[in-house]
Image: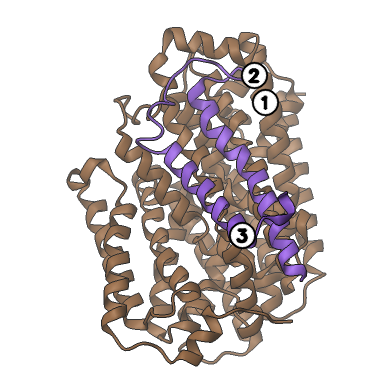
Chain colours: A brown, B purple
Amino acid sequence: MQRWITIAGIIGLYLAATLVIGLLAGRRASHSVAGYVAADRSFGLLVMYFVTGATVFSSFAFLGGPGWAYSRGAAAFYILSYGALGMAPFYWMGPRAAALGRRHGFVTQAQLLRGRFPSRGLSALVALMSLVAFVPYVTIQIRGAGIVIEAVTDGHVPLWLGALVAYGIVIVYVLASGAMAVGWTNTFQGIFMVIIAWTLGLYLPHHLYGGVGAMFERIASVRPELLTPPGLTAAGEPWSWGAYSTFILVSAVGLMMWPHLFMKAFTARDDDTLRRTVILFPTFQLFLIPVFLIGFAGVLFPSSPGDPDFILPFMILRTHLPVLVVGLFCAGALSASMSTGDALLHAAASVVVEDGIGPFRTLSDGIQRALMRMVVIGVGAFAYVAALDDSSSLVQLLATAYGIISQLAPPIVAAMYWRRATTVGVVAGLVTGWATAGFFYLHPALRPFGMHEGVLGLLVHVPVLVGVSLATERQAPEHVEAFVGSLHDA
Amino acid sequence: MKRRVSLGAARALTVCYLLLMTAAVVWPGAVPASRIHPFVLGLPFSFFWPALWVALSAPVLYLLDRVERRHRGR
């Protein structure tokens, strides 16, 4: 039998297993909005651990991570540096958001914001900007899945078909089962990703160079510039410390503000589960070490792919690995793509309906669920079409997604911790923050020290939020107390 | 000894660790660590450095949790 048929068979088995898990999971959820969006707040530690890990680490980490290490060297270490920093504050913020969610019935981030700062415009603005950040992110995931399948089947399964099948399955289980399916498939996919990454990351350097240390000794003698931060730009020029440092900062601030991650606080069974997820997250994050090792293993490889993002599939196919390993690698890459893509689609639907439409129209539970399913299909179809378009503009858009999302941090922190914050202050901060980030996104040459536009946005955002809040009338104390006071609910 | 660590002290120490970690992985704190040698566990020092801070954050948060848990128990 030809290799590609065997590999396609393994991928088929993996996809079938994902579909079955996704559909079976849905039978456990109630037919309410809380069931669809927040899985009836039922996730235990095992599910939360893998859901969080698998959702955070997407195609960008699994394919982009090796690509960065391969082409930009130590610049990739920024990806390793921010995750634990971004997650740690959630030890306190997560349980607080969860308690507010239980008390007030919130299932999205914007509902929490609107609870403290009553403004329908604020809610719609947050929904719109989240959607703008989501679409390129989903597109990259779909494209990643298509690329992997096309590469390992020698082009017998083209990008459009591979992406269509993989994301057709994602859409089916997200539609049928909502958060429950996302949770249980991500558990399966998270285990897959971690095992595949560690196995390949230790095997490839050993197989090609005789060990990890030996590999780096070779790289140090031939390409030493790859091993010292801030590494290189995509064009091979030295990257700046300003850019490297602010990429870490904006990613750390923005990480848990992604609606699909923040909403996980509303899906946990209890606060201890959330806290333990945060404590254990760094152990999941260390899987980036083998991911980078795979990329570094490609540095001295005799031939190279045209696009650095292809380094992983490229090497896999040229090191004469057993066909089973190739198939499993592919499943791992698909896991990374689908576990983030499903969460993004699900969150996009929840955000659009709950925050974009909900505040303006009173909808029954049934209609809300129907609308969410339509948004899942709409966003999925739009991103699929965009994924087939082979242009780099989407990568550009993705780079700015963190600039948009990181601006959600100041209002969220203010809503839960700062008594003096006002609605006008929060809206003013968001608008100026987004405007500043947008301006520097469009004019990269004007960025001081090459700083990320999201950090520049925050530098304007926070003073405006504080200044305007102090200049406007304070909120009623009993209203504020419900959010900022101690939350001892049973 | 550890039993007498107050909640406030545990939180302050955790925040200190996170701030130190931030300082250690961005400019200027990361500059002295931006070196190839010595190798640690087969990794160049510049690679080992952020990995070490990430790995240590788990026990730091675990110790914080022990104190928080005892406090909540009362």
CA gap between label 3 and label 2 equals 36 Å
The answer to whether any part of residue A165 appears in the image is no
Q: Using the image, tell me which numbered label, if any, was put on residue A91.
A: 3
Camera-nearest label, 3 or 1: 3
Same-subunit check for callouts 2 and 1: yes
Q: Amino acid at mark 1?
A: Leu
Q: Amino acid at mark 2?
A: Leu
Give whichever of A415, A33 is nearer the camera.
Answer: A415
**Mark 3 / mark 1, whichever is N-terminal:** 3
Q: Is the Cβ of the residue at disc 2 closer than 8 Å to that at disc 1?
A: yes
Badge 3: chain ID = A
- Where the N terminus of chain A falls, by quadrant? top right
The quadrant holding residue A37 is bottom right
Determine the secondary structure under disc 1: helix
Give whichever of A429, A323 is nearer the camera.
Answer: A429
Q: Position of residue A87 (x, y in %)?
A: 56, 53
**Side of A221 relative to B2 (left or right):** left
Which residue is rendered at x = 30% and y = 65% of the image? A461
Residue marked by disc 2: A204
CA gap between label 2 and label 1 equals 6 Å
Which residue is rendered at x = 18% and y = 43% of the image? A445
Mark 2 closeness class: few <14, some 14–19, many ≥20 residues within 10 Å: many
Mark 3 closeness class: few <14, some 14–19, many ≥20 residues within 10 Å: many
Residue marked by disc 1: A200
CA gap between label 3 and label 1 equals 32 Å
Q: Position of residue A403 (x, y in %)?
A: 36, 55
Q: Amino acid at mark 3?
A: Tyr
Q: Position of residue A11 (x, y in %)?
A: 72, 39
Which residue is rendered at x = 78% and y = 72% of the image? A29
Q: Using the image, tell me which numbered label, if any, was put on residue A150.
A: none
**Mark 3 / mark 2, whichever is N-terminal:** 3
